[in-house]
Image (cartoon, coloured by chain):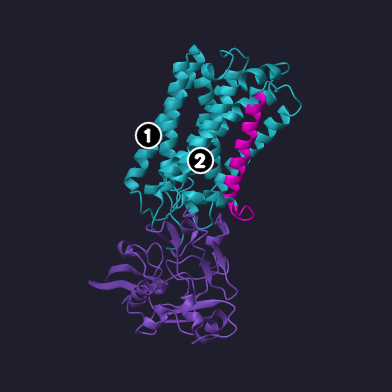
Amino acid sequence: MPGPTEREWPLIAFTILSQAAVGAYGTVAAAFLLGAAPQPALIQNRVFSVPFLASVLAALGLAAAVSLLHLGRPGRAATALANVRSSWLSREIFFELAFIAFVLILAILRWRGQEAGAAFRPLVIAAAAAGALFLLSMSRLYMLRTVPAWRGLHTPISFFATAALLGPLAVLAGRRMLFDFAGSVDGFSAGAELAALAAILVLILTALLLTPRTGLAGGTAETLRELPAGRIYPLLAFRLLYLGAAMIFVFLFHGSGHTGYAVLALLAAAVSEILGRYLFYALYARTGV
Amino acid sequence: MSVPFVHQYAFHYDASVCSGCKACQGACKDKNDLPPGVLWRRVYEVTGGSWKKEGGVWVPGVFAYNLSLACHHCAKPICGEGCPTKAIYKRDDGVVLIDTQACIGCRYCEWACPYGAIQFDAERRLETKCDFCADLLGAGRPPACVAACPMRALDFGDLDDLRKTYGGTSEIFPLPEAGVTEPALLIKPHKDAARATKDTAEVANWEEI
């Protein structure tokens, strides 16, 4: 049975980069929407900076470009929007484009100094909703009824957790370059740290409990043809080690405030998620032949 | 050989007489000029069992049978459900086709099909599959695989007519539950198929497929 493992590096890059971009946006949007008054106005002006929004757009653009490498005919990629009615793949691209459009409008408003207008807050919410639907569609398209290894709840949980891990860590690692403030907004860093730590715990639990073949509660007898079973557990072990390292670096960042620890946490988390996503595709096994 | 008033073209496969000669596979590849690595019809060799000790004697308990599979032009084609470009569609006579102009080669259909019917053509960079020899059907001739079978293990026609003539099932190892896609496939199982499960049997010729 052919599996997607060997040729899926473009999708590994696309899913992780997209999730990181949505997570980074979500971190800032959450600070803006949930922060205590008069904090929102302060955060809006400082964290919704043009460099930050441009970075989110750049990550999404890079992810989209890399995803084209997966296609046999990348020149016709635009036609993938044709079946929004029944295809989660079409919906994924639809919400990806919607998210990009909303973030682009926010960036233009911010660049023109129009962030105080009445449209800014609804646009922030609309972009957050489009980002969440983008990740939801991305999860659902893998949950095929003929692919038990992807069918479970571990797929959406791990996709959203990747966003909640890499996004906040990217924001913390790049905050001095991306924002007008130097980490002095009350609760912003602490919120991002908490989100990352919670995501690490969720990812560890998901890997240990739910992931088919590697999880305690999700084991299946599906045949693995692409990845020898002997390589699964070492990869999983390395993934958990890198998640643990990311957790330690987050604690060190919390204690010292040194950006270097946030960068290390981001790098460890990124390696962990690359290993995790590699395993995700490698565990593909459909019913039948 | 044409079948009037067809609502759903289907294949019947008699696994009890199939010798595994793969003439169907070869005829399909030849008729459709398929490139290396692409097989619209595939013959799976299922093997299983073991030697068992009965009293003081070891006796063979092994078994093997063949499964000739193509696209089964399902009533619920999961390949088409997820296709982002609507490149996969079903004709009024039940035949499922791929619009090669619309296919972008995302391979999503290939992941989903539980019959391995969707085959990626690396030269043309798009997905391909059995088209039930639609051109031959139009000319009143049988599909190449059916015509080539020396054992007459393959037949085709309207699903309801085939069911009346042969009966049969589409649920033998290693195929999925029929309800997943409702394939237009009827199989007369090999006598040993009842012994085959995912724990007792396996496909032995993956490298050929």
Say if the magenta span includes residue A101. yes
Q: Quadrant of residue A25?
A: top right
Q: Which chain is purple?
A: B
The type of residue carrying mark 2 is Ala
Q: Secondary structure at mark 2?
A: helix
- Residue stretch rendered in magenta on the structure: A82-110
The image position of residue A55, as x and y in percent, is 53, 27
Say if the magenta span includes residue A183. no
The image position of residue B123, as x and y in percent, is 37, 58
Give the residue displayed 59% in from the left and 43% down from the top: A136
Task: Name the residue tied to disc 2.
Answer: A64
Q: Quadrant of the C terminus of chain B?
A: bottom left
Q: Quadrant of residue A222?
A: bottom left
> In the displayed structure, would residue A258 be above or below residue B148?
above
Q: Can residue A202 be spotted in the picture?
A: no
Label 1: few (<14), some or many (≥20) within 10 Å?
Answer: some
> In the displayed structure, would residue B65 be above or below residue A211?
below
Label 2: few (<14), some or many (≥20) within 10 Å?
Answer: many
Give the mark nearer the N terminus: 1 vs 2.
2
Q: Which chain is cyan?
A: A
Q: Main secondary structure of the magenta part?
A: helix
The type of residue carrying mark 1 is Phe
Answer with left or right where residue B111 lies relative to residue A41: left
